[in-house]
Image (tube, helix red, strand yellow):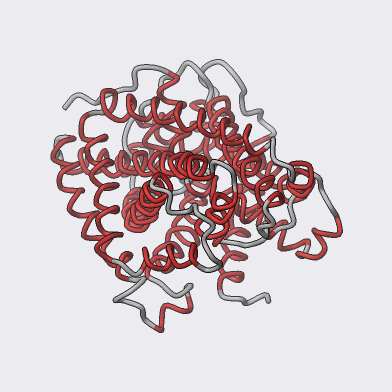
């Protein structure tokens, strides 16, 4: 079966960036920035992005480009005979399934909020608590949330099932252009609000006292973990797009562009949110409720809030769907190559697998609320997110890093030769020491401190 390739470098950049850009950029980044005290967190986040995120993206892309295969076959092709690195390919596939089994649900929430904003659900001087009730009522209605989830799964399977170029590349290019356009329109509007100066001061100006109030270690860890998780590394989503790359540019060049686009979206999301929070007296440290409860309160008070709210949640929908489509491509490509299925058959089979696999997440907010889940956050979504975000992503990133530098894996010589092929930024010989000894320790720190923070071991 002839393997498709992308039609252009722009197509690759858009797809890889779409994989990285998601809810984490527009929902998690602003609320983590808020609870981490603003300016110093943003500065540290950008530093860790260069130290941690970009190298691992280049490694995952390298495994894909060096093999020309999806993750399962990629490790099998590149590993020394008799080694077991190919197990990571299966772990990547399982992690992708788990991610989709809750990410499709959350993406469905975005579609629901887009529709609610369009019909004016968040306007009309709603009383205190009514917007929070909208969110609670949505979660308590499994038929409603299941319906939106199925829409997301269907969109993902149809887009990837049509083909790499005619489906995924074509749709993602248009969606990314609309995402970037809506993002800049929303930011331009926010920067005209009365609270802009105060919001930008909180967001972008480092304040040592705020950092001390949050805790220096907490801010450092939050910045380090956000830089790692924002790029969706560790479960093969980058590797699959690496397998569609040509060799005109070096891997560091392409990784830097992907990280820059990802960071641009996150930073502009802050420009949208923080001026609005300070204008309408919404607490910027509201945490996870910032997106679904606090921001609708802003649109409720804002002139033309119905339309700004609709545009914002459509923007959020594009961001979440971009990740859905990218991870679906990894799943569909892995199944096609591993089992010899056509792209269309793989898409159809995975529609049912992911739809039924997502039902527990939907029911976890109503019918299937169990006491033992409180250790992970209280819901099945929290459990699935724990497995992916705290286990699969950091350990997967560690495996990719070690595979690319150890003699018992692909090895530094083979990886650096692949990484430096093409025009652009190259790995220098001295970087081998950093990538071999220091980078894995940083990833281990993200993993260990993440577990400690999750289970309140250090608090």
Q: Residue furthest right?
A: 209
Q: Which residue lies at the image location 69% right of the left edge and 41% below the top edge?
A: 46
Nearer the observer, 381 or 394: 381
Residue 161 position by quadrant: top left
Q: Residue furthest front?
A: 124
| x and y, in percent, of residue 362 in the image | 31, 65
Q: Can residue 277 be seen in this view?
A: yes
Q: Is residue 58 above or below residue 89?
A: above
**Left or right of 196 in this view: 144:** left
Nearer the observer, 1 or 369: 369
Residue 197 position by quadrant: top right
Q: In this view, does 195 lie above or below 222?
A: above
Q: Quadrant of the N terminus?
A: top left
Q: In this view, does 231 lie above or below 352?
A: above
| x and y, in percent, of residue 49 in the image | 64, 42
| x and y, in percent, of residue 206 in the image | 81, 48
Q: In which quarter of the image is the C terminus?
A: bottom right
Q: Residue furthest bottom?
A: 371
Q: Which residue lies at the image location 15% right of the left edge and 38% below the top edge?
A: 340
| x and y, in percent, of residue 264 in the image | 60, 34
Q: Can residue 20 be seen in this view?
A: no
Q: How many marks?
A: 0
Q: Which residue lies at the image location 61% right of the left edge and 47% below the top edge?
A: 227
Nearer the observer, 266 or 403: 266
Q: Which residue lies at the image location 34% right of the left edge and 71% below the top edge?
A: 364
């Amino acid at each position: 079966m002839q393997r498709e390739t992308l039609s252009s470098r722009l197509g690759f950049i858009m797809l890889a960036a779409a994989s990285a850009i998601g809810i984490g950029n527009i929902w998690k980044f602003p609320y983590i920035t808020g609870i981490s005290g603003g300016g110093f967190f943003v500065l540290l986040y950008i530093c860790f992005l260069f130290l941690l995120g970009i190298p691992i993206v280049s490694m995952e892309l390298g495994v894909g480009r060096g093999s020309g295969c999806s993750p399962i076959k990629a490790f099998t092709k590149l590993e020394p005979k008799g080694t077991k690195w190919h197990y990571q390919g299966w772990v990547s596939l399982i992690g992708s399934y788990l991610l989709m089994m809750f990410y499709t649900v959350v993406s469905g929430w975005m579609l629901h909020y887009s529709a609610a904003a369009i019909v004016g659900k968040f306007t009309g001087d709603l009383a205190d608590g009514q917007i929070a009730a909208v969110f609670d009522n949505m979660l308590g209605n499994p038929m409603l949330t299941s319906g939106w989830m199925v829409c997301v799964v269907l969109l993902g399977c149809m887009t990837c099932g049509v083909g790499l170029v005619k489906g995924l590349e074509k749709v993602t290019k248009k969606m990314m252009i609309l995402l970037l356009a809506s993002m800049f329109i929303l930011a331009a509007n926010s920067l005209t609000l009365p609270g802009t100066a105060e919001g930008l001061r909180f967001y972008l100006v480092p304040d040592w006292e705020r950092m001390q109030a949050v805790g220096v270690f907490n801010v450092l860890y939050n910045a380090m973990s956000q830089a790692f998780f924002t790029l969706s590394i560790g479960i093969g989503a980058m590797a699959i797009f690496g397998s569609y790359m040509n060799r005109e540019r070096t891997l560091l060049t392409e990784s830097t562009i992907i990280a820059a686009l990802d960071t641009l979206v996150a930073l502009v999301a802050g420009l949208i949110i923080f001026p609005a929070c300070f204008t309408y007296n919404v607490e910027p440290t509201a945490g996870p409720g910032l997106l679904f409860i606090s921001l609708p309160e802003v649109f409720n008070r804002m002139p033309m809030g119905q339309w700004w709210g609709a545009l914002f949640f459509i923007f959020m929908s594009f961001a979440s769907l971009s990740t859905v489509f990218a991870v679906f491509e990894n799943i569909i490509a892995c199944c096609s190559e591993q089992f010899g299925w056509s792209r269309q058959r793989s898409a159809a089979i995975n529609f049912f697998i992911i739809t039924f696999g997502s039902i527990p997440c939907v029911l976890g907010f109503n019918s299937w609320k169990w006491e033992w889940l409180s250790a992970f956050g209280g819901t099945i979504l929290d459990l699935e997110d724990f497995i992916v975000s705290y286990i699969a992503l950091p350990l997967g990133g560690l495996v990719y890093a070690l595979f690319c530098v150890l003699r018992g894996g692909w090895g530094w010589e083979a990886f650096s030769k692949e990484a430096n092929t093409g025009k652009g930024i190259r790995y220098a010989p001295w970087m081998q020491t950093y990538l071999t000894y220091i980078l894995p320790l940083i990833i281990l720190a993200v993993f260990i401190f993440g577990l400690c923070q999750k289970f309140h071991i250090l608090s």
